[in-house]
């Protein structure tokens, strides 16, 4: 298990930024990525040579020139750590990034080929995994992860990764990560610091999409 408290005590500080058009990572979720652009190959190599940290950001609409030089991004990001790395013969690689904490990122000048940010992570408050929260979580799980076994199965898989105190929040976040929502809707969920309110917003979004369809 990652000692998140010790890790976050070293922030704010600079980390690499990986902006994508349609991906919003959440703390406690695992994101597989295929790395092929030369600048992001360098980013992964640098991360692996250090502490493995990369901040995932949602890319803002931009021109091709902006994307190639300084991709604009939404400032609420998710700090992640590379937990798996599969190098491929031609320099590409497959990685898995495990979400650690949401936070606010500010772009800084750097001579690296990828964007670098000053990141101030956020520690979400804990919530009790019981009562009405549990019932609402069961509803969200049934709508977002119907093929992932039971909620207790997910709970067992996550507990050894995030710890008991952060487990309820990680369960909400995995539902949000898997939900079939628009990226901006997911970003709004990530921006919400209270896990109970985040769960309510997720259920509202799922219900709204169901009625629309």
Image (tube, grey):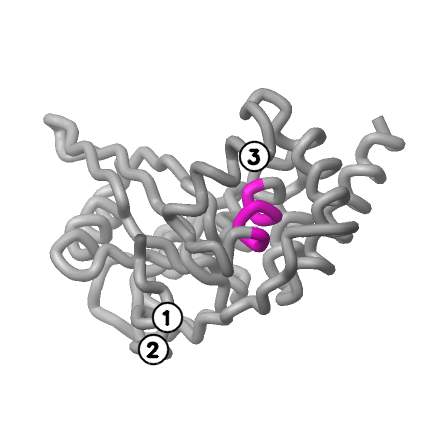
Mark 2 closeness class: few <14, some 14–19, many ≥20 residues within 10 Å: few
Residue 8 at x, y percent in the picture:
36, 72
Q: Nearer the viewer, residue 65 or 61?
A: 61
Q: Is residue 9 magenta?
A: no
Mark 1 closeness class: few <14, some 14–19, many ≥20 residues within 10 Å: few
* Residue topped by disc 3: 152
Q: Residue at x 27, y 40 (%)?
A: 37
In terms of sequence position, does the residue under pointer 3 or pointer 1 come before the other? 1
Q: Residue at x 45, y 71 (%)?
A: 121
Find numbered disc 2 in the image and state the secondary structure of the residue it sits on.
Answer: loop
- Label 1 and label 2: CA atoms lie apart by 6 Å
Q: Which residues are magenta?
A: 168-174
* Residue topped by disc 2: 9
Q: Please say if the residues under marks 3 and 1 sit with CB atoms less than 8 Å apart.
A: no
Find numbered disc 3 in the image and state the secondary structure of the residue it sits on.
Answer: helix
* Residue topped by disc 1: 5
Q: Nearer the viewer, mark 3 or mark 1?
A: 3
């Amino acid at each position: 298990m990652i000692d998140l408290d010790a890790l976050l005590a070293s922030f704010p500080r600079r980390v690499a930024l990986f902006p994508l058009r349609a991906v919003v990572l959440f703390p406690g979720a695992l994101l597989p990525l295929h790395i092929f652009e030369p600048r992001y190959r360098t980013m992964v190599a640098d991360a692996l040579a250090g502490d493995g940290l990369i901040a995932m950001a949602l890319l803002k609409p931009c021109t091709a020139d902006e994307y190639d030089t300084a991709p604009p991004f939404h400032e609420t990001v998710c700090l992640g750590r590379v937990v798996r790395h599969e190098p491929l013969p031609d320099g590409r690689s497959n990685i898995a990034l495990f979400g650690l904490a949401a936070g606010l990122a500010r772009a800084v000048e750097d001579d690296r080929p990828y964007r670098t940010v000053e990141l101030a992570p956020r520690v979400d408050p804990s919530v009790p995994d019981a009562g009405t929260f549990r019932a609402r979580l069961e509803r969200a799980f049934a709508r977002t992860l119907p093929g992932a076994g039971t909620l207790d199965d997910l709970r067992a898989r996550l507990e050894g990764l995030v710890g008991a105190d952060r487990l309820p929040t990680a369960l909400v976040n995995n539902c949000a990560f898997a939900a079939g929502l628009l990226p901006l809707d997911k970003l709004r969920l990530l921006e919400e610091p209270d896990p109970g309110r985040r769960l309510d917003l997720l259920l509202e979004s799922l219900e709204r999409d169901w009625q629309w369809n």
